[in-house]
Image (cartoon, rainbow, N blue to C red):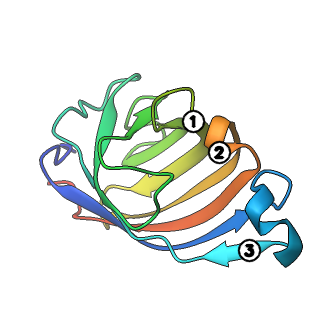
Amino acid sequence: MRINRHAAIAVLVATLVLLPQAFPLLANQGVNTHSLHVTKECSEYTGAAGSFCTITSSNVGRIPVGSTVNYDQAFGVPAGMLDSNVVLNAGDGNWAVGRCTLEAATGLGLCTFSDGVGSFAGFNARIAVSGEPAR
């Protein structure tokens, strides 16, 4: 199975949990959830460990255009899947860690983020991913 490296993958649905201790301006409001809409471009993604995609649009200021999603594991293990630890790198010491699993045949997947540093301290997200199937 070949990877469609040039397809933009849209992250369509997400719930971001912003913990008040990580975002003092929100401290009086308790835990907050927000919708996230992000598009990423994957022409630099080769399917090898260490490949990445670049964010091309985002409705969340903490995830600016130009941020990268870096994949630690190679595509295809298990067969036809991407199942990898990821780092969302927004630059300047701001990054979050998580895991993404994507089925190549459907282009559907799930990414979860559990924490980070800098502006991503306390960051939690569950993201349903939709993109073009690999050809």
Quick check: marks 2 and 3 in contact, CB under 8 Å?
no
Q: Earlier in the sequence, mark 1 or mark 2?
A: 1
* Quadrant hosting residue 2: top left
Which residue appears at 75% of the width and 63% of the height?
25
Q: Amino acid at mark 1?
A: Trp
Which residue appears at 43% of the width and 33% of the height?
70
Quick check: marks 1 and 2 in contact, CB under 8 Å?
yes
Task: Kindly identify which residue carries mark 3.
Answer: 32
Task: Kindly identify which residue carries mark 2.
Answer: 120
For label 1, the SS is strand
Q: Compared with residue 42, is residue 89 higher up or lower down, i.e. above or below?
A: above
Q: Is residue 39 visible?
A: no
Task: Kindly identify which residue carries mark 1.
Answer: 95
Residue 123's disc number: none
How far across and how far down the image is residue 59, in percent?
A: 40, 68
Q: Earlier in the sequence, mark 1 or mark 3?
A: 3
Q: Compared with residue 132, is residue 84 higher up or lower down, i.e. above or below?
A: above
Q: Amino acid at mark 2?
A: Phe
**Quarter of the image containing the C terminus?**
bottom left
Q: Earlier in the sequence, mark 2 or mark 3?
A: 3
Quick check: marks 1 and 3 in contact, CB under 8 Å?
no
Q: CA distance from mark 1 to mark 3?
A: 19 Å
Mark 2 Cα shell of 10 Å, populated few (<14), some (14-19), many (≥20): many
